[in-house]
Image (spheres, rainbow, N blue to C red):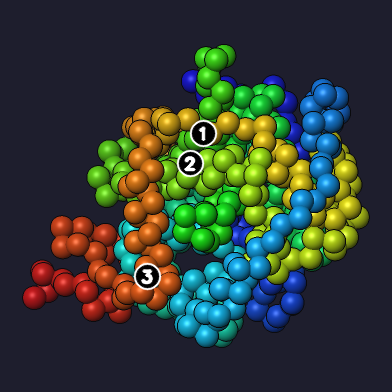
């Protein structure tokens, strides 16, 4: 049974789900200024014990880190990298966990969606590949996630004034989410940013729910992914497989954060990849939000050090992951799978995804036995891999 936290904890979030985009502060006629939301409630963060607040504010001085080789290698490959999907669409953003799952679902659909979005941004008007699907089912799913989030958080608008503000907000959200998890046993919509050392890339995501086990001796948080369904039917194996990949990616990133919290924490790589200045002063509102959250931060570097210290308080996530499907009709649980983590398998899936995103191979079409997916695709009329057997 899901436990409802005894109090809401202020969290800072951005409007978009997994986007750590840091170029939104060069206004264009097609892109509105970025805004963010500060999550509050009537109870102040002061209700959290002083001991906990001190543990967050004890930010150590920066370590001397040298990642020159990482930067030199990156610069050497700049020309070749410019043509890759990763550079073209995820430069200074990081690879989203949903990029991995969308690639696994259908590589061609993922490619179409990227170029469609790029065209819309450049032209300032919609792209029609057989129509844009924004179905009632999709809206209901988003609304359900918002509803669950607001059970433990409240929101107040807060404007980000720089790329450093954007990153700081994400990290403060993680810090406060972890604080909520450790005190109340549950948090929701937890953003995660982690350097995947094995793959050499930054990956970002947002975990639907994290819950502490009921057993007092078990300190390994449980990661939960919620999927809503418009029909009260059991999801297909392909849908379940996609959900498993998503959950395992979250665990992979979580465990990487924990493993490197005490050593080799990639602060320098963070600043270099996202082109951030750790000494840039945060906005006044954001500095106040940090103070309300229990720690003092004047600049992004202060927030990153507290982010690292927060990771030091965590244990690796539970080996058992929860994939839950619920009905949009009455929110009843249709299926709940307890999934055993398979690190080898998920690293293989990430590796296969990166082969495409790094330009090492062409996108493939869905397998013949999964062409039913094409019936739900916006781009089917443009796809050479689709065969309509009925019309033939």
Q: Residue at x 77, y 51 (%)?
A: 63
From the image, tell me which residue sits under label 1. 317
From the image, tell me which residue sits under label 2. 251
Task: Characterize the local packing of mark 2: few (<14), some (14-19) or many (20 or more) Cα atoms within 10 angstroms.
Answer: many
Residue 381 screen position, x and y as percent: 28, 77
Which corner quadrant of the image does residue 74 belong to?
bottom right
First in residue order: circle 2 vs circle 3: 2
Q: Secondary structure at mark 1?
A: loop
Residue 378 in sight here: no
Residue 241 screen position, x and y as percent: 31, 46
What's the distance in space between the residues labelled 1 and 2, CA to CA?
6 Å
Q: Secondary structure at mark 3?
A: helix
What's the distance in space between the residues labelled 3 and 1, CA to CA?
29 Å
Residue 29 screen position, x and y as percent: 70, 81
Which of the labelled discs sits on residue 271, or is there none?
Answer: none
Q: Residue at x 48, y 41 (%)?
A: 251
Task: Characterize the local packing of mark 1: few (<14), some (14-19) or many (20 or more) Cα atoms within 10 angstroms.
Answer: many
Horizontal side, residue 136 vs residue 373: left or right: right
Given residues 54 and 363, the one toward you in this image is: 54
Given residues 133 and 283, the one toward you in this image is: 283
Q: Residue at x 25, y 69 (%)?
A: 365
Which of the labelled discs sits on residue 356, or is there none?
Answer: 3
Mark 1–mark 2 CB contact (< 8 Å): yes
Q: Residue at x 41, y 65 (%)?
A: 354
Q: Is residue 289 above or below residue 24?
A: above
What's the distance in space between the residues labelled 2 and 3, CA to CA?
23 Å
First in residue order: circle 3 vs circle 1: 1
Quarter of the image where the C terminus is located? bottom left
Q: Secondary structure at mark 2?
A: helix
Mark 3–mark 1 CB contact (< 8 Å): no
Task: Characterize the local packing of mark 3: few (<14), some (14-19) or many (20 or more) Cα atoms within 10 angstroms.
Answer: some
Horizontal side, residue 144 vs residue 42: left or right: left
């Amino acid at each position: 049974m899901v436990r409802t936290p005894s109090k809401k904890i202020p969290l800072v979030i951005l409007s978009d789900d997994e986007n750590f985009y840091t170029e939104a502060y060069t206004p264009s006629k097609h892109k509105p200024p970025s805004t963010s939301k500060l999550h509050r409630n009537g109870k102040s963060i002061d209700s959290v014990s002083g001991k906990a607040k001190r543990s967050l504010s004890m930010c150590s001085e920066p370590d001397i880190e040298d990642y020159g080789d990482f930067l030199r290698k990156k610069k050497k490959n700049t020309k070749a990298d410019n043509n890759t999907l990763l550079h073209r669409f995820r430069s200074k953003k990081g690879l989203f966990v949903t990029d991995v799952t969308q690639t696994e679902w259908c590589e061609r659909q993922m490619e179409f969606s990227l170029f469609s979005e790029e065209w819309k941004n450049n032209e300032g008007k919609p792209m029609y590949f057989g129509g844009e699907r924004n179905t009632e089912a999709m809206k209901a799913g988003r609304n359900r996630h918002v509803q669950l989030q607001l059970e433990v958080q409240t929101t107040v608008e807060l404007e980000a004034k720089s790329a450093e503000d954007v990153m700081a907000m994400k990290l403060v959200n993680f810090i406060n989410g972890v604080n909520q998890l450790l005190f109340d046993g549950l948090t929701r919509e937890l953003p995660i940013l982690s350097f995947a050392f094995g793959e050499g890339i930054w990956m970002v995501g947002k975990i639907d729910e994290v819950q502490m086990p009921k057993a007092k001796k078990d300190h390994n948080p449980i990661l939960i992914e919620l999927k809503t369904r418009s029909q009260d039917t059991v999801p297909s194996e392909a849908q379940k497989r996609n959900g498993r990949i998503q959950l395992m990616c979250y665990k992979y990133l979580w465990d990487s954060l924990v493993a490197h919290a005490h050593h080799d924490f990639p602060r320098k790589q963070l600043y270099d990849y996202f082109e951030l200045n750790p000494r840039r002063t945060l906005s006044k509102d954001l500095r106040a939000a940090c103070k309300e959250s229990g720690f003092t931060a004047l600049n992004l570097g202060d927030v990153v050090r507290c982010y690292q210290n927060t990771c030091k308080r965590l244990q690796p996530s539970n080996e058992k992951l929860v994939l839950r499907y619920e009905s949009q009709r009455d929110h009843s649980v249709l299926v709940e799978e307890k999934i055993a983590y398979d690190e080898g398998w998920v690293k293989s899936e990430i590796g296969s995804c990166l082969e495409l995103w790094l330009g090492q191979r062409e996108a493939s079409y869905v397998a013949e036995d999964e062409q039913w997916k094409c019936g739900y695709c916006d781009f089917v009329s443009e796809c050479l891999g689709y065969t309509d057997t009925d019309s033939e």
